[in-house]
Image (cartoon, rainbow, N blue to C red):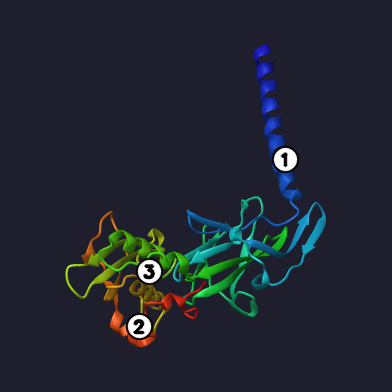
């Protein structure tokens, strides 16, 4: 009998503890004074947190209303700013268990940074608990906003600054890498690595050098990030897209830095490499010669001084 009573007491204690934990969790949920955070990510390695804007939140019989400016006018920090490339998928999901605080993602929109009047609605899909947005082709600095309805708890608007294929050149670093010869492999490789990628979905792993005979040349090989396999945007000349424009500027830089280089070639493929350079697997190619770029831009020796071409 004593054993049975002791077992009953233990069971009652366990149930009391579990009940207390449940009640505490529910109370914490009810006591929250504002909507949950909204993480967003392009991949497991690239995660940020959207900035909360206008919201209404009901907690313990009170209604809390916070009004803010349009997300396009927010001041964003690194924690809520993300670099992306056209074609990438952006995932946004409230940091809350939907079973405890049910929610519905109402709408998504994009605006030019600082220009709320440019806002347009975006199509999105739902994957699990996340809204999935495919980054459009236009390059520049944009603000993506998401409206979430937390049903009986309230609603909230979130904003995120997205830099789509925005490139910057470290002019002083590049100038320090000037060399007379294509055959100076270490300096040429360092110069290539210092160039901005044509898009944030690009990865540069290899280069090859033509040093045996004229025309002397540099070939740069690009491939996609893992999550952009078969989705990488290639350079296009008719009409010229942003990938093509960046590659042309990168060719200008290399021809300026490597004095005896005659041509620069960029090779692209749509699948990641498997640990070694396989030249035959690159199906995209874009070549620039010193002659054609000199005709278009003038002497290339001091092209990095052109502020209209290279961001400081």
Residue 121: x percent and y percent? 58, 76
- Say whether disc 2 or disc 1 marks the residue closer to the N-terminus: 1
Q: Is residue 76 visible?
A: yes
Q: Is residue 196 visible?
A: no
Q: Secondary structure at mark 1?
A: helix
Q: Are marks 2 and 1 in contact (CB under 8 Å)?
A: no
On the image, the x and y values in percent for residue 65 come to: 78, 63
The single residue placed furthest to the bottom in the displayed view is 295
Q: Which mark is residue 297?
A: none
Q: In front here: 221 or 120?
A: 221
Query: Based on the displayed image, in which of its 4 quarters is residue 75 positioned?
Result: bottom right
Horizontally, is 144 left or right of 304 in the view? right
**Marked residue nearer the N-terminal end (3 or 1):** 1
Q: Nearer the viewer, residue 143 or 109?
A: 143
Quadrant hosting residue 299: bottom left
Question: Which part of the image, by quadrant, shows the N terminus?
Answer: top right
- Callout 2: SS: loop
Q: Is residue 260 above or below residue 148?
A: below
Q: Are marks 3 and 1 in contact (CB under 8 Å)?
A: no
Local crowd size for mark 3, using a 10 Å CA cut-off: few (<14), some (14–19), many (≥20):
many
Q: Which residue is identified by label 2?
A: 237
Please tell me the numbered disc located at residue 24. Answer: 1
Instruction: Determine the residue positioned at 61% across, 53% down.
Output: 95
| Residue 32: % across, % down | 74, 51
Whether residue 100 is situated above or below residue 204 in the rendered picture? above
**Alpha-carbon span between mark 3 and mark 2:** 16 Å
Residue farthest toward the left in the current orientation of the protein = 213
Q: Which residue is mark 3?
A: 232
Q: Is residue 96 left or right of residue 290?
A: right
Identify the element where label 3 is drawn. loop
Q: Residue at x 44, y 70 (%)?
A: 87
C-alpha gap between disc 2 and disc 1? 62 Å
């Amino acid at each position: 009998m004593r054993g049975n009573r002791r077992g009953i007491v233990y069971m009652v204690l366990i149930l009391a503890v579990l009940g207390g934990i449940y009640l505490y969790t529910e109370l914490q949920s009810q006591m929250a004074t504002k909507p949950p955070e909204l993480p967003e990510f392009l991949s497991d390695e690239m995660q940020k947190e959207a900035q909360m804007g206008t919201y209404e939140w009901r907690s313990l019989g009170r209604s809390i209303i916070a009004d803010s400016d349009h997300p396009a006018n927010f001041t964003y920090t690194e924690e809520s700013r993300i670099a992306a490339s056209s074609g990438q998928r952006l995932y946004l999901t409230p940091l809350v268990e939907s079973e405890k605080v049910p929610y519905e993602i109402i709408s998504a929109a994009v605006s030019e940074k600082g220009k709320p009047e440019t806002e347009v609605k975006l199509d999105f899909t739902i994957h699990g608990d996340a809204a999935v947005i495919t980054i459009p082709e236009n390059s520049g600095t944009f603000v993506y906003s998401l409206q979430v309805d937390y049903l009986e708890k309230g609603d909230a608007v979130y904003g995120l600054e997205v830099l789509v294929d925005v490139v910057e050149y470290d002019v002083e670093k590049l100038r320090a890498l000037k060399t007379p010869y294509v055959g100076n492999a270490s300096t040429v490789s360092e110069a290539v690595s210092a160039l901005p990628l044509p898009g944030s979905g690009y990865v540069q792993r290899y280069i090859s050098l033509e040093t045996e005979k004229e025309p002397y040349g540099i070939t740069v090989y690009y491939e996609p990030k893992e999550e952009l396999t078969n989705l990488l945007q290639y350079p296009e000349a008719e009409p010229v897209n942003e990938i093509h424009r960046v590659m042309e500027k990168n060719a200008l830089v290399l021809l300026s830095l490597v004095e005896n280089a005659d041509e620069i070639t960029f090779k692209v493929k749509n699948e990641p490499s498997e640990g070694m350079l396989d030249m035959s697997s690159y199906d995209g190619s874009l070549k620039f010669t010193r002659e054609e770029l000199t005709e278009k831009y003038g002497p290339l020796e001091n092209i990095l001084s052109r502020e209209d071409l290279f961001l400081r």
